[in-house]
Amino acid sequence: MNLRNVTRKSLVLGTAAGAALGLVGTVGVGTASAATKLSYNCVYPLIGDRGLDVDIEVNLPSKIGSGQSTGTVQTRWTANLGADTTEGLRAVDAASIEGHAISKAVVASPDSANVQVNIASALQKTSIPDSGSFSIQGFGTAPALKFTKTGKVTATLGDFDLKISLLKADGSPSALGTFASKCTPKSGQDLKVVDMDVVSGDQTLPTPWERPPWFPGTQRSDVPGTLNYGFNLAGSSKIKAPNGTVPLKGGIDVRVDGVSGAIEGELALDKTSGPMSILGFLPVTADVRFEQVGKTVGSYANGEIKTKSTMWIYLPRMAVFGAIPLHAQANCRANAPSVIDMHSTPGQFFNPKLGGKLIADNYSIAPLENCGALNGILSIFTQGSGNTIDLNLTPKA
């Protein structure tokens, strides 16, 4: 008996999952068993988990004679990917997908105990639409099977190890390059994908399928690169101590590492002003200026953004009723820079091609310095924690 054959067949199914960047799978094992529906979780760089539905056929008979060869085992499948997968792939500049997969299956037969076998398969290079769902075709083969004892042969599918290449519209590698991803089946499923009887006497075998021209395909090894995004931003910052809100505008340009998702960039906020109050009732208009220290850093992982920016906060002018100056010192500022941690909306996919929310739940402003004779008094009413930022990011043209 050639166990690698059975596993190969089963792993072709794995390729389907890999091709699709794998998620929910539906697998049918030709005449060797009834259709089986399988669901998977696959982890991909930057964009996180995605789902996949797979329809699969395996060119095996439901019965095979003891000592009879099956001939080359063939598998063909259609992987159907949802709109959320399309959005995720497009977000990282992918216009087409291709690749291979190593599937892991456990084979049980009358000749041998359970054996785990790794099998490789390929998927057709497929264009990714701008939006909506799409499908990928897959094909695989495995060496012929032969069993000497009568009884039952089954193959149970396990994890998929994927090797996927995402390409840009011009055919060059995307910033993710060629990457590995693991897909694991969800719990509570019957993972059996082959169910074949070994009987006495030769049986009729199915007619072999014609191999597609893209099989077995070429293994790519594209080096990951950097994704570049630029955003305009608009929103506001709530400053707790003086009970004031100032509008914010500006921009940020970031570079995202295609392997780690590490972010580095430059944040620029325009000078602004807004109403505040001193002593809880005295209306004050304050000019506010932000000056970045170093670079904004952070991460883009599982479809969410987290950043850290360090900013000097200047208050160069404060005036009662907007007209009576309390001070007008250009170097009036907090005596230490503020560290501002920001994040996109938790649990929601942040698509850099569309933009979205970026929020700071809490940042602190240090005591003031260089603010003239009223420095100490003004500092009491501006310093402290509990300050927030709420921004909308839109892609730059």
Image (tube, grey):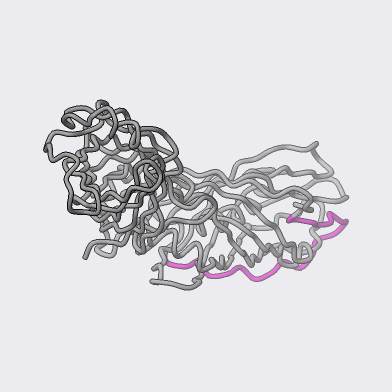
Q: How many marks?
A: 0
Foreground: 293 or 216? 293
Foreground: 168 or 3? 168
Specify whether 70 is left or right of 235: right
Residue 143 visible in this rendered orientation of the protein: no
Please, is residue 257 above or below residue 214 in the view? above
Specify whether 309 is left or right of 40: left
Measuring 23% from the left and 52% from the top, which residue is drawn there?
273
* Range covered by the magenta-colored residues: 193-213
Instruction: State the image coordinates of residue 68 (x, y, percent, origin top left).
Output: 75, 55
Residue 372 visible in this rendered orientation of the protein: yes
Specify whether 382 is left or right of 109: left
The quadrant holding residue 310 is top left
The quadrant holding residue 235 is bottom left
Measuring 43% from the left and 72% from the top, which residue is drawn there?
131
Residue 197 in magenta stretch: yes
Quadrant that contains the C terminus: bottom left
Instruction: State the image coordinates of residue 129 (x, y, percent, origin top left).
Output: 40, 71
Instruction: State the image coordinates of residue 84 (x, y, percent, origin top left).
Output: 51, 64
Instruction: State the image coordinates of residue 199 (x, y, percent, origin top left).
Output: 87, 56
Quadrant that contains the N terminus: top right
The quadrant holding residue 255 is top left
> Would you say the magenta stretch is mainly helix, strand or loop?
loop
Foreground: 28 or 382? 382
Residue 9 in magenta stretch: no
